[in-house]
Image (tube, rainbow, N blue to C red):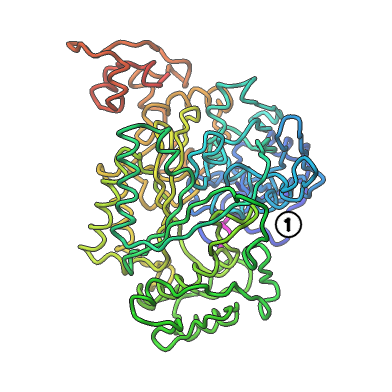
Amino acid sequence: MFVWLGVVVLASAVQGWQNYQGEWPCSSRQQSDIYPRTLEELQRNVRDNRYVKGVGSGHSWDSYIGCAGTTSEAVNIVMTEFEKGDRHVDLDLDDMSIKVPASMMTRDLLRYLDEQRSDQYPRGLSLRSYPWWIDQTLCGAVATGTHGSSMHEDGGSLSSQVRCLGMVLADGEYKKFCEDTHPEEMQALRVSAGRLGIIAHCFMKVIPSVDVEVFREGLSESEIVNTVKNMQEVYVAVGEEELALKYPDVQMFWFPQTNHGYKWTYEPASEQRQYTLGRGLDTYNFSDPENVQLPELEQDSLFDQEQGRSNGTANGISFRRDPVSYVDIKELAEESQATGRQPSGTGQRFPLVVTQSASWWAQQIERLILRWYPTGTFAYKDAFLQNPRFGTEYTLYDQYEFSIPVSRAGLCFEGLVSFVKENGLGEGFRTPVLIRLVKAEDDILLSNTNGEPHVYINMNDDVSYNLEGNAVNNRFISAANYLRSSTCQGRLHWGKTKATLDRDTNGFSEYPQTWCRFGQMVSKLDPMGKFEGHAGHGSPHNYWTWDNCRRFGFLGRNNSEPVNCSDIPPPASSYTCAEQLGWGKCESDWMLEGNYCASTCGRC
């Protein structure tokens, strides 16, 4: 998701990429970023440089996976100018797929597909599911396994909706890989975090769009816990198919600060109806902030109901029931006597989430959420929860996300809620926790949901940047570490913050059943380590290491084919390898050390 400018270096380019907020910069020792506009420029710059990393709009919160390196031989290739514009998009209705250049934002793709209306497709087209983040490059989102909430067979993460990928490889060759012609390569390429090459084009599957009826329900904290526990119970009792029927695309917000939340569910609209007014979030033009109006507050928040208030007033700050404007919110931030520093990125910004109490900010944001995500009938592109531009452009924070195996998600989440309450960790939060469910993606080696469906828990650290010297938000980090504990076994999202929590681990410990197979593809497509990035060469913490793969015989020297790829059952055991897999024993140390059941466990 990061890149250069062909032959010309942008005058405003900095030495080393940084994310959209101006944080997590790459090393100043890197070359200036390059922004290729054509495929030829992209191929030449990949071929002619020792270490490169492809990047996009910078909606990541980490440098050690994203940056090209720490030396003058490293350069980021930023894809935001590559084949820019709708004229480079190619829609194939016979194949129900669309070719998307790496510069295209997810929001723009959803808009483009929605406009493709005809007698055959009166409501246009869409992706089957799309993520909370839609103001990032689609191909960057694919590379990191970005997702919404979807248990549908043709849904899941964006990576699972890819039909083909057009890649520029280490030698500068452009090659198109497809699921029907290159199934083995696609298992690795769908989620590669930029390790195997630079994505130039994503060929995405599309579906006919329909109108969607959106339902919202306020829940107590115990009801949210019981919902996640029920996901675990249904999966363990009757499996993924029944889980998908009961929770096809549910999404929830949990407020750790005020002990309640909301749930959204979705159904195809039963008939053609007028859209609910004021919903299309991309219609809020913040370039004219004096005239921006958000939807009316259709009901009082749960907090206001609990406090017996009907006019949305808290601590002397009024959130009127009539539409609230950008100016109101800016004044609110100023009235809160913000002490946080301004974001160092571009644009006119202010620290929306500041040093007021956690519950105070939860009250304000809850009212905004009720305006942004009402009930009603919406076009498919507007129906599901999505981060408004306001939330991406006017706040400064780090985002963490954990995927929890659904077979333990209920136990994990119940424990997390108790841990937060018992230790007073709610004060480490200012915004709600987003909870989603995504189907198993066993055909993607580094998918967060490889193995079984996972419950995603997404949360923001809005406090650290407002503390003196950007001090660590210890309450928040304690909650995050709980999600990495043996109780939860949470995997970290490829595009979110990893470095703070992940210095003592590597890919093998995170993906023991599939990491070595990914390593084989690295040796095939990037044998000289051109794309290993900051987390590889010259790094004190090399995430891309294959030592354990060679140690246990899963890879030969120089990451060649495995020395031994067979199903040798554990000695002195009457159980088959299939049974060991079914019981979840493939990751056990005694299984790894003996390289038992290597084929069944997917290590080769």
* Secondary structure that dominates the magenta span: loop
Q: Secondary structure at mark 1?
A: loop
Q: Report whether residue 578 is seen.
A: yes
Residue 257 picture quarter: bottom left
Tell which of 98 and 22 is nearer to you: 98
Which residue is found at the position 57% from the left and 54% from the top? 213
Which residue is found at the position 60% from the left and 78% from the top? 325
The amino acid pointed to by label 1 is: Leu
x, y percentage for residue 440? 44, 34
Q: Look at the image and say whether residue 73 sits in the magenta stretch.
A: no
For the record, the magenta segment spans 17-21
x, y percentage for residue 418? 23, 57
Which residue is found at the position 53% from the left and 64% from the top? 374
Tell which of 208 and 14 is nearer to you: 208
Task: Residue at the far left: name it.
Answer: 572
Q: Look at the image and say whether residue 19 sits in the magenta stretch.
A: yes
Q: Is residue 572 rendered to the left or right of residue 411? A: left
The quarter in which the C terminus is drawn is top left
Task: Residue at the far front: name it.
Answer: 271
Against 75, residue 161 (above or below) is: above
Residue labelled with disc 1: 10
Tell which of 319 and 144 is nearer to you: 319
x, y percentage for residue 528? 56, 28
Q: Residues within 10 Å of mark 1 (few under 14, many from 20)?
A: some
Residue 89 picture quarter: top right
